[in-house]
Amino acid sequence: SNLSVVRIGPTHDNISCTILKNAILDHFHKKEQQQEAAAAAKESKDSQQNNRTLATGGRFQVSNRYFKAKLLLESIEQDATQQQEQNAEEMKQSADGLFHKEDGIILVFDAAQSNPDLPMSMAASFDSLDSVHDNAMKTSAKTGELLRLVVGVTVQEHGAMEPWELRGKAYEQEYSRRIMWCLDRGYEYVEANLSAKGLTEGHDDRDKEGFARIVEAISGTVWSSAIMEPKKTKQLKASFTKERVAVQEKEKDMKNPYVPPDPSLLGQVQLESKVEEKQSLEEPSLSDEQRAELAKQALLKEDGINDDSKGNEDNVDDQYL
């Protein structure tokens, strides 16, 4: 099976990255424990123990009504030597039977120290993300193929910072600059307050922000390690079959009832039309008196009266004319 790797960083001199990483792991570990407790009556002791071994180190599990996925939250290394050592460690970890797939990347900066109006450390600033992103793309072009987040971290116990405190006096311009940087590189931009209050707020909101949005993005991504729930797989197959039958029935009902004429009959009709036209051309034109006389004789013939009959001719004229 697969193990989806999500890179997070930069980690060097960046306490914000450590805080966010711990917050993510803690959230999903607690959720997994709650799910284990709810399913304790149905699961064996061994399977529960296997699930617990998954939630160690940087590993955690994403589980929802549709699928389960195994994830590994790993740091981004900027140094080439460190990257080589990390690659060797990945090969060693792969010996456990899990194929590591680079699926996601989360870039973290200290929003409080990234105010351009104030002196800031490049190690944890927004501008430091340029080199981190470039190095990550050089390591693997598929890094962050399924999820890309840029997170500006603050820790405010007594209310969030004002926009100008986060982005400077020209905060709208600075905010737009960050958004454009993210859009150009395929990232979603999130500002998250990771205080005790900030970690619990907004998880039930429809339009989530902050840490709740980070959790939603991770939970809603269909990772390469995702395994569909058997019940949901059956439901999806049944729904697909039902929809397909409905479409076929609709197409059948919409079928045009018009039946085109037999092409072989078309030639016969055309031939009869031409014969009638030819006969009409060959017949001599008659005067009105001649047509009246022919009609008179036809009526007499129908009544059994001969043209040579005499004495009743005047009566006939009176009867029919």
Image (spheres, grey):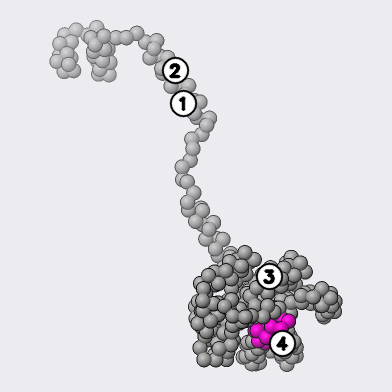
Task: Check if residue 14 falls in the magenta segment.
Answer: yes
At a point 48% along the width and 53% down the height, the residue shown is 253
Task: Compare marks 2 and 1 and give the one earlier in the sequence.
Answer: 1
Question: Marks 1 and 3: which is nearer the front?
Answer: 3
Give the side of residue 206 with respect to residue 237, left or right.
left
Q: Which numbered disc covers residue 130?
A: 3
SS type, badge 2? helix
What range of the chain is rendered magenta?
11-22
Label 2 – label 1 distance at C-alpha? 10 Å
Badge 1 amino acid: Val
Q: Which numbered disc covers residue 269?
A: 1
Task: Check if residue 224 falls in the magenta segment.
Answer: no
Report which residue position mark 4 lands on. Answer: 55
Task: Compare marks 2 and 3 and give the one earlier in the sequence.
Answer: 3
Report which residue position mark 2 lands on. Answer: 275
Where, quadrant-wise, is the N terminus in this rendering? bottom right
Task: Compare marks 4 and 1 and give the one earlier in the sequence.
Answer: 4
Badge 3 amino acid: Asp
At a point 69% along the width and 79% down the height, the residue shown is 123
Q: Nearer the viewer, residue 172 or 266?
A: 172
Badge 4 amino acid: Ala
Q: Nearer the viewer, residue 40 or 306?
A: 40
Label 2 – label 3 distance at C-alpha? 89 Å
> Badge 3, how many Cα within 10 Å: few under 14, some, many 20+?
few
Where is residue 53 drawn, in percent x and y? 75, 88
Label 4 – label 2 distance at C-alpha? 94 Å
Give the side of residue 255 with respect to residue 211, left or right.
left
Q: Quadrant of residue 7?
A: bottom right
| Mark 1 vs 3: CB contact within 8 A | no
Badge 2 amino acid: Val
